[in-house]
Structure formats: structure tokens, C-alpha cells
Image (cartoon, rainbow, N blue to C red):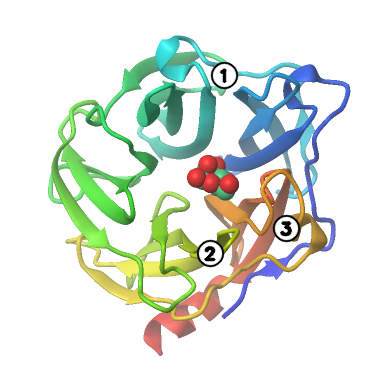
Amino acid sequence: MRLQRHVLNPILKPDPLHNWESRFVFNPAVAYDGELFHMIYRAQGEDMVSRLGYAVSIDGVHFKRLNEPVFEPANDDELYGVEDPRITKIDDYYYMLYTAYAPAGPRVALARTKNFFIWKRFGKILTDEENKDAALFPEKIGGKYVLLHRIPPDIWLAYSDDLINWTDFVRIASPRKNKWDDLKIGAGAPPIKTEYGWLLLYHGVQKAERAIYRLGFMLLDLKDPTKVLKRTEEPILEPEESWEKFGGVPNVVFSDAMVEYEDKYYVYYGGADTVIAVATIEKKKVYEWIKS
Ligand code: BMA
């Protein structure tokens, strides 16, 4: 089971005319509202601070972007930048979890919007320790909101009544020895519900002189997502194209976004922390793997 790269990749590149995104664009969040694909992407320019830009598409492949970022560092907790957004629609809002990069290290922060331009910020929401790769489930499970997060090197869950105060941290998955995900793992996109379980795209990092980032799937139990029902033995996407192997950070495919569109899953990802690409897989193929 492998993702298929789109022939037009990469679909978004740095723009030398915009100082804030002249060097790298990568690791986007994407939300599909039934008509438009809204992309919130991480960008770095001359000052190397991460900001978030907005781009929009009607086919999920051709994106038009704005001249200015829509979300920028707002306080000392975000001094080094706002990184790696992941967006989940709950009721009337798009909730965005992102990495607030403070001088003391990365923290998980939350903001929400209805339109991708006007944001309400809630600041850091997990404990004051290194944490990132957070993603919200799209609905309550057992009466609680649930989020994935990463205390290195493992993937954890946390639970909440109000999306702001999170408790009951549970470790659900760890790196596997002698595999492509032997060093650390983290959530990719927010989980997608299927009749078989929650489909979770995740990234795995392999120990090497220069670490290699690849993507895989896990399936989590619908009622108790602490239970990992299945996990891909082999990666579903790994650096192969020149723009995945060479760039700001070599040998990286890293994703924060998977969207259901027609009969496929669309996975948006950063190549070598420099460009944005899309790869797809038929839902049918994923279900075959689940049932195998
Ligand atoms: C991770 C994050 C990602 C990045 C990856 C590879 O720690 O910083 O944003 O894509 O490393 O550099």
C-alpha cells in the first residue's frame, strides 16, 4: 500500500517576491468544506521565522495564495515561530493546533476561526514541557474531546471537556526497533473516521546520520482510541523525489493533512521542508489493508 504522488508536484513553492515565504513553504493543514480546499501552510523567509500563509483551491491541486501571512507569532511563546498547523472542524469552527516555538522549546497551542482570516487565540494548552504534533479528533469520544500529541518519542492522547484544559494523558504508540520508525513518531493529520476505526496518518523518523522522515497509517479503535488495532509495517510514502531528498532539511516527507475527496484520501505534505506536495490513495485500497 503506497500513496501516489500527483504529477503536478510540487504544488506550492517558496515565492521569492514575498519576504516571509521566500525560502521554504511546507507542512500545511488542509480543510475541505465541500466546495473549496482551504490550505494553511507553514512558511519561512529571510528571517527564518515560521508564519502561516493561506491558499485556496477548487480541485485540491491548483492553489492560489495571498500576498501576506494570515497567522503570525504574537508573543514571546512564539518568538521563533508558529509551525506545523493541523486543522479539525468541530461544530461551527475550524480548530487549529500548532507548534508555538518558544526559546525554551516547542509547545502545543490552539486557535480557532470560521474563515481562516480572523482567529481567536487560546495560547499554549498542554503542560509546559516539550510537546508538538498535536491533532484533534473531529468529534467527542465517550463524552470527551480527544487530542493526539507527542511527548518524545511517543504518540499520546489527552482528554478534555472544553478543548482548553487537557488531562488523562495516555501513551498509545512508540517507535519500533529496527524499523523505519525506530527513533520517534508523531501524528500526521487529524484522524478520519471509517467504519473500521479511526484512520491516523503518522510520521516515523529513522535513526541515521541524517534522520529520515516517512509516513505510515495506524488504525485506532472507534470507541477507545488508546487501542491501536493496526499499523503499517512498511511506510506508505518515503523520500524518493529530488525535492523530497534535497532541500532545507533533506530526506523528509512530513504531513499534517489528509482530506477525503470523492473516492480517495488526499495527503498534503512538505518535501524536504521546502515545498508542498500532494499524494493520494483510493479509500478502497486502505480498507483492503485494514481487512487484510
Ligand atoms: C520536525 C518538525 C517538522 C519538520 C521535521 C523535519 O521536528 O520540525 O516541522 O518537517 O522536523 O525537519
The span from disc 1 to disc 2 (Cα, nearest Å) is: 27 Å
Which image quarter: residue 75? top left
The residue at the far bottom in this view is 292
Residue 39 visible, this orientation: yes
As displayed, is residue 212 above or below residue 93? below
Quadrant containing the C terminus in the rendered view: bottom left
Q: Which amino acid does label 2 sit on?
A: Leu
**Residue indicated by mark 3:** 244
- Mark closest to the chain's N terminus, 3 or 1: 1
| Residue pictured at 25% horizontal, 27% vertical | 128
Q: Picture coordinates of residue 219 (x, y %)?
A: 35, 69
Res 104 quadrant in image: top left
Disc ID at residue 71: 1
Quadrant where the N terminus sits is bottom right
Asked if the residue under mark 2 is in contact with the one under mark 3, i.e. CB atoms within 8 Å, the reply is no
Q: How far apart are marks 3 and 2 (CA)?
A: 13 Å
Q: What element carries label 1?
A: loop
Ligand 1's image quarter is: top right
Residue 259 at what x, y percent from top left?
55, 53
Residue beneath label 2, please? 215
- N-terminal-most mark, 1 or 2: 1
State the residue in front, 183 or 200. 183
